[in-house]
Each structure stands twice: as structure tokens, then as C-alpha cells.
Amino acid sequence: MKVKPRNLGKTYIDKTGVRKFREWRGIKDTLYDYAWWCVMWKDMIKFVLKSPVQVVKGIFKYRWMLTYLSLPQFLDRQLEGMRGIQLKAGHILYDVIVKHTIDIIGTEFDADQKLGGDKALAERIICFDELVPTEIMAGFPNLIGIPVQTIPIFLSSMINQHISEVYLDSIENFGVPADVCPLPSAESGIAVEGDYPIFGKCFISCNMPCDGSVMTSAYQDRYFKLPTYCLGVPLRYNDEVDAQEYAIEEIKGCIAFIEEQTGEKFDWAAFKTAMDKYNEVTQFHFDLWDINRTDYPQVTGNVPWLYRMYSFHLHGGMDDRFLKANDKVRKLMEDGYKKKLPCTLEMRHKALVWSCPANYYTNFSNWLEQCWGIVSVMDMETHVGNVMVDTSTQEGLLLGLAQLYQRTTMRKHTKGGYKNALNEMWSIADAFNCDTIIMYDQISCKGMDGLQGMFDEQARERNINFIWVQQDLMDPRTISRRDMRNQVNSYMTSVLREEPLDPTLVDFDDCDAF
């Protein structure tokens, strides 16, 4: 039976990506969506009223702060077209992300010395590179770990596709070549522009995931002027002997460094409790993956990878709101699977999305689903940190943490050799019974350049639809959202000869959208 198109593209105001009116999803789902929309506004208003002076100062001091006021539009994009379980799960998981992010911003502003923040609070903060997950801070319950780039640029660039542009231009004018990965470039641009808040007792840097990120550490070191520990993480994380011994020693060194700088002692009991909770969160993702392997996946698209990336890096076993959200969504998923409910309007293709996604187009997987019926049941950024930590001994805790850090965002799969980059992709595609792979070609990343021919050849041998999608991670001026969509459109019409589920979503201009 032919599915009636929803004509979602007709509701956009040209170039802005903003809707002329809220999406109608039927009475029940529309009311549910609106109720959560009100909850989000309540959280944002509560945040402003808690520290109105600091928030106003932050708005005038940092250009990225205004981006967070457009959060409602961001969530509308993420949940576009969703109904039933997909919509409910999306709202529940995004709600905990919003609440946790608001807490981080509030802490940063309260401690920011540029805004006249609390000096004692600033001294309790350990600054992290955003690609070092904060789990290690669970062993220091009297301290606070904050990834310094996450709020100013990483999350803000997901909400507003244009926020990175001024920082990229700034660092290029400073002398950094334009072909460097835009993520470390934008992070360095924040330092050049003076748009990082100032707080912290010391800084935890790292060698992840690439040389560009190592370059960023130099700019941040000069900007923050804090004692710095560089956490060295092995590339070949499948080496179970020498690499793991080295990784554990690095973790021990990091713990000793924090103890030396702060005078605090590592609390093994608190760390164990947090890692038990971390394992609960990881088990939720395993449960989600198990259902998505079947013919009746329930939570798909952009929701799983954004939630997994956030919970992996920032939950750290220290916020029970994640556990409560997981329990609610697990029940929804299991009920939907038992009833064999479809996750979307029509699932034509089960897809694996691989390599680094574009920060400026986080809802791309949702567009694939709504426009072409290409349902992403797994992706590279969801499949990170997939290790259950042995919490029975101190040695098990250290090894588990070391293994987590080796399997972090943008590090797992694209680094560490042929086995990680290629073989694991095919094994996951087989496990999830995928007939399509969406392969992001991050044009400024040199990590995957030599493997493109091998990917194409093996895809032909396996009779898998292999769709390359070029993007530039943080810079939509190089390859726009529209350009990304057109690459898929060309493949679907010229190679597969398929008709779109929703013709109004095939081509539209959102160049000025957030």
C-alpha cells in the first residue's frame, strides 16, 4: 500500500528551516509534543531566573550563548515527523540532555572569573578536553569536571550551524591552514577570540582523536594558563597486553596529577558506585541495540547517537536522571517490540551510518528516514565505549576506564588501523542486517583517505548500497546541508530508481537556518 506523504517540506519558511506552524501529529502525539515543549521552556526560564545577572552577563560576553536560546527550534528539527514511541523516547532522552546541559552552563557562569564568578567554585573545577569522558571525576566527589570546549563550540555548533564560522575564520587569519579538521580549528578559534570562560584548578588534555586536536591543546594551554596533564591513549585498542598496561599507567598518572593539584584523594568507593551506574546506562544502550537488530527497531535515527555520545562523555555515573530516563524508554521499546509496531512511516532500508557525522546537520538521519525511508538502526558514534566495567576490584575499575577512553567519540573505528576502520563496520552491518551504509566523507579529515577504494570494492562484493556523503564537520559553507541531501537524492534516483516517501523534502533551501 502506497504511503501518503506528509508534505513536511511545505511547512518551512524558505531558507530559514523554520516552520510556518507547529507540526500536526494527530491529537494524542501533538498534545504530547506540546507538553514536552512547555517543559523545555520551563527549564530554560528556571535557569535564567536562578542566576539572571550571570546569564545576562554571559549573553553580552559570549556570542555562543545566544545560540542556546534557539534550543526549541533545535529539538523540533530532531523530532520532525516522529510519532508514537519514537516521539516519546526522543523527548524523554533529549529532556535529560537539556537539563544536564543547563546545569553545566549554570556552573560555568557561576564560576567564570570573567563574569565575577565564585573563586572558591572555580578552584573546585577540573577542566577537561571534551574528548576525555568525565568518568574519572566520579572518584573525586568534592570536585567538578567540565569539558571546556563542549558548551562554547561542540554543542552550540549542533544547535546553530553558523556559530563555528567566525571562529574558523579567526584561527585561519591567525595562521592555521584551512584544510585542518574544523573541530580543533574552531576550538582554537574560541581561544583566539577569547570566548572561553575562565575557571579551573588544572587541565586534562589528551592525544585524541588526531594531530589536529593535539594542536588545539597548545592554544588552550596558552589561554587557560593552568597546570596541564596530557592523557596519552593508545591507538590500537584491540592490543590486549602492552597497550592496556600503558593505558592503565596513564590513568594512574592522571589521578595522581589531580590529587597533587587539588589536595583531594581519589575515592574508590565513590568511583565504584558511579561505574556501577555507568554500566546501567551502557546496558540500556545494549538493550536498544538488541531491538534495533530485529525487523522491528523502535528508537532509530539521530536520537540514539546524540544521546549515547552525551551520556558516554558527560554522565560519568554521577546523574541519576539518566537512569530514570533509560527505564522509561526501555519500557517503551520493549512494549513496541512485543506488539511489532513499526518505528516509522515506512522502513525501506535498514542503514548503518559510519564515520564522523556533521555537527551542523545532526538531524540528517531523521531526514533520511522521513524523505527516503532509510532508517538508521546503528551508527559509529552510538557504537562507542561499548565496554562493561568490572567494578569488583580496583584493577578491574582501572582497566575498564582505560578501555572506555580508548573507545571514545571520533576515536573508535576511524583510528587504529585496518581492523578497526573496515572490519568492524562490516561486522556491525551484518549484525544489524543492514542493506545500506551511509558513509560520511569528512573532507578535512585525513584518517580515512586511503581506504575509500576498499570500502567501495567490498560493498559491491556484499551487494550493499554504499552512499558516500561529503561534509565538512563544522563548516556548512564548504558543503551545505542541501548539498549533503542532494548526494543521497542522486543515489536514490539514479542508482536505486526509487521514489521519495515525501517529495517535499527532496529539495529545500535551509542555508540561513540555525
Image (cartoon, rainbow, N blue to C red):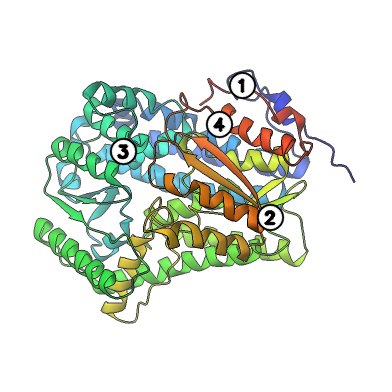
Give the distance between the C-alpha atoms of the residues marked 3 and 2, in whole angstroms.
37 Å
In the rendered image, the vertical position of residue 246 relative to residue 170, given as above or below: below
Q: Which amino acid does label 2 sit on?
A: Asn
Residue occupied by mark 1 = 509
Give the distance between the C-alpha atoms of the residues marked 4 and 2, in whole angstroms.
39 Å
Residue occupied by mark 2 = 463
Q: Which amino acid does label 1 sit on?
A: Asp
The first of marks 3 and 2 along the sequence is 3
Foreground disc of the pair 4, 2: 2
Q: Residue furthest right?
A: 1
Q: Which residue lies furthest to the top in this view?
A: 14
Residue displayed at 54% across by 51% down: 455
Viewer can see residue 92: no
The first of marks 4 and 2 along the sequence is 4
Tag 1's secondary structure? loop
Tag 4's secondary structure? helix
Tag 3's secondary structure? helix
Residue occupied by mark 3 = 184
